[in-house]
Image: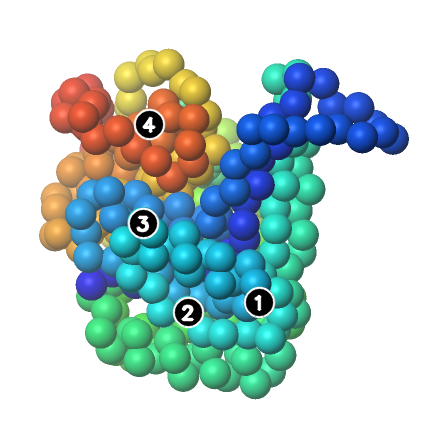
Amino acid sequence: MIVTITMNPSIDISYPLDTFKLDTVNRVTNVKKTAGGKGLNVTRVLKQLDDEVIASGLLGGFLGESIKKDLDEANIAHSFSQISGETRNCIAVLHEGMQTEILESGPVISVTEAEDFLNHFTKLVEKARILSFSGSLPAGLPKDFYAQMIAICNKNNKPVILDCSGESLKLVLESKAKPLLIKPNTEELADLLGKDVSEDIHILKETLNDSLFAGIEWIVVSMGAKGAFAKHQDKFYHVEIPKIDVINPVGSGDSTVAGLTSAINNGDSDSDVLKKANVLGMLNAQEAVTGHVNLDNYQKLFAQIKVSLV
Ligand code: ATP
């Protein structure tokens, strides 16, 4: 079983408007509300791949119940830890080809709620084969919370695929607890190292050899339309992808994480792990709905991806 973790989920609301008028009323008809958060996008793609998956993390209040209902309707198993605060809304106003976002910071987690979650999580880890953590941590949790969770997984010999950024990623890299894989994009990598990261293969190789990444078996740097660059143990891979028509690339990184988790769980070869991850990223970019992929085009794209040892 794959366990996905979303610590700060949301109800994602999209408001499409022809024009967005400030300081007056905007009326909207075609409203979409979905259970969101990066980990839930990963979960939905894993479900479409027919992988056995269970979603976990923190949920609270009326919107928390609404997320559970949404997952039930999609036939997705879940086991969240309850919090007293209210799960957040994230609003995207789509107007004149632009996207204006209003993101609530979300609930503040108490010390007791954090402890309750870790107890709940420990039981899930025992049942899991592999775990995938995505997204930011809600306020109130210590910044090293992912490192604490990974320590529990390491103790149980369960691999972790980690997709987070900023301080929580830095603290994981500095801790003794090690995920199996991290998936930064080039911006997150630059932010982490405090310097520009170019997409030049030699520079990427040098960058991933930084001592900050010691002990991390897999580093997959996703590069949007330019594919990906990866390090597995002492091997480096360049992943070249075909040019595709893109509709909405938001969530392609989450789809990529689903592919990495699924392929590693299946024991695929390095090349197939990277191909599956990139195909799913591309398939997500070809759809309007985040975390949705049309698997009919899977094989065709898979055959067009080139993975080379560099
Ligand atoms: P997000 O945070 O929106 O989920 P990300 O920055 O983590 O995205 P990206 O590097 O943008 O992740 O995309 C992940 C993968 O999806 C890429 O490695 C690539 O395979 C595919 N992809 C994304 N955008 C495009 C695009 N415009 N054209 C083709 N493939 C794309």
- The residue that label 3 is drawn on is 74
Q: Indicate the secondary structure of the residue bearing disc 4.
A: helix
Mark 1 sits on what residue?
A: 61
Q: Earlier in the sequence, mark 4 or mark 1?
A: 1
Q: Quadrant of ligand 1?
A: top left
Residue 16, visible in the rendered structure: yes
Residue to which mark 4 is pinned: 282
Real-space Cα separation, disc 4 to disc 1, in angstroms: 35 Å
Q: Residue at x 17, y 37 (%)?
A: 271
Label 3 sits on what residue type? Ala
Q: Residue at x 61, y 51 (%)?
A: 89
- Picture quarter with the C terminus: top left
Q: Is mark 4 within 8 Å of ligand 1?
A: yes
| Residue pictured at 30% horizontal, 33% vertical | 293
Amino acid residing under circle 2: Phe
Q: Is mark 1 within 8 Å of ligand 1?
A: no
